[in-house]
Image: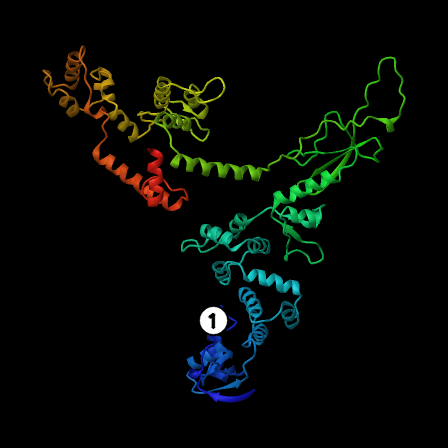
Amino acid sequence: MHLIKVDPRALKENPDRLRQTKSTPQADALMLATIKAVGIVQPPVITPEAGGGNGYVINAGHRRVKQAIAAGLEEIDVLVDEVANDNGAMRSMVTNIAFEPMNPVDQWRAIERLVALGWTEEAIGVALALPVRQIKKLRLLANVLPAMLDHMAKGDMPNEQQLRTIAAASLDEQKEVWKKHKPSKGDPQVSWWSVAQGLQKTRMYARHASFGDDLAQAYGIQWVEDLFAPADEDSRYTTNVEGFLGAQQEWMTANLPKKGVIAETTNWGEVKLPPKAERVYGKPAKSDCTAMYLDREGRVQSVHYRMPEAKKPKGGKDTGGTDNAPDDVGDVARPRPDVTRKGVEMIGDYRTDALREALGRAPIEDDALMALLILAFAGQNVSVTTGSGGAYYGYSRLAKNAAVLFDADGKLAFDIDTLRVAARTMLVDVFSCRENATNSGIVARIAGDMIGADAFLPNMGTEDFLSCLSRPALEGSCKDTPVLPRQRVKDTRAALVAHYKEGHFVHPSALFAPDPAKLSDWLSSRAAAADEDEADEDVADVGEGVSDEEAEAFREAAE
């Protein structure tokens, strides 16, 4: 290492420098004033440019060089050093820590940078006088979503508990949560509590496990060390809750005592003992039973209880003591089901995909297709606010229209007349044109126009309805009638009522045919929504967005 004078403008910045966070304007102004007053006290460190270049790269002292240029200095003293194997990464980190406390995010990234350059975690720990566990923890924090790290570097930091939850989540999970909670111009502060809540997962700890490595492997359990926990405790955990509880259940089954049962717990975590069982709090006797169960944290717990003694037979004598009690352990909870809740949910996904595929591709007759449409309205995920009295009908009420399609053995068996009646009654319950929450909207108007429902509209030439019309509308209703408008509105109305007493009047606004402009807007909005659904959904519908091969398969199924 030797000292030379160079023009600061000729020095090149190191693109891989350690300190990425910008200094404050106040700190830069203070350094500039110091350089103007006394010059540069500590010369920057530079290294020869690699790759055949003849220039110099700044290794330490980027701010000093920048402020020297701002001060107008023509030359400055610099120390020329040889290029280190790690490009000076460790020396740069130690120097920055000594000069000024580093931004935590820069420190996390610096640790990861050293590992990428070939430093081992043990060597970094020795160089920085930090435990290896702390180095592992800092590396974990460096792998938080880069967008989150950039925001944390600005000074908006979560607390340690929130940071612990964020760092334990995968990058994909962090991306999804960050989309919802990232800062905006109007609200630059991040709700780290909401971010942590979105990434929170239930943890089951290895220290609570009674099973061994064989069952852990069989249930696909992989232990992860919680680097934020105290170093003197077993902090390994898994988020595979189903697998953990399954392994605990299997261990209890294999290690159940002779007079033992596996019990369930209440919503408050209390064990459910068999009816009439008396819990034993003291030292259990040989005749007492044992109930094993899992507490809220997944730990295996056990309690002792005794069942009431069997009644003595009439005229008999008690020939045994408590040690000769029957092996009755009582009636306890049902055993673990063959398929867990997660498995049932997976089956539901498989069935839904298969059903949608069959509905799109399998050959279905017209009468069967109509029956399936009726069944769809009877599904428990369907609720309709109907026009029949304005009542709220759920799937249980609509199901009555589908029940007539089944025979005594629970099989779909119907003739075409029964199918027609079921379809009509279902449509009667669903369609409504009332101006309240039951309104089906424009589709009910289209349906009425299609089937000629205008012919079923009642006579509207009554006092009740005509009183709802304005003078121009009322006088317009006199067209094509011998009734002439009167000076007073009520006289005109009375004349129209008398004229239509034996006739039939339907106001044009009551006809079912929808306004063409509104119908066009509705069709356009539905088409736009369909395009968005095709972009978002994995399941393709018939029409645009499917391949030629799929479209041909749909046509064959329809034929």
Q: Position of residue 70 (x, y in %)?
A: 42, 79
Taking depth in this image into account, of 400 and 171 the one nearest to the observer is: 400
Residue 86 in view in this figure: yes
Q: Residue furthest top?
A: 502
Q: Residue at x 59, y 53 (%)?
A: 161
Q: Residue at label 1?
A: 26
Q: Position of residue 147 (x, y in %)?
A: 47, 59
| Vertical comparison of 361 with 499: above or below | below
Q: Quadrant of the C terminus?
A: top left
Q: Amino acid at mark 1?
A: Gln
Which residue is depicted at the point 21% across and 34% down?
516
Percent of width and height locating residue 46: 51, 82
| In-image side of 367 versus 408 (left or right) | left
- Nearest the camera: 5 or 336? 336
321 versus 74 height, above or below: above
Disc 1: CA contacts within 10 A as few (<14), some (14-19) or many (>=20)? few
Question: Helix or strand or loop: what does disc 1 sit on?
Answer: helix
Side of 25 relative to 452 (left or right): right
Image position of 207 with respect to 521: above or below: below
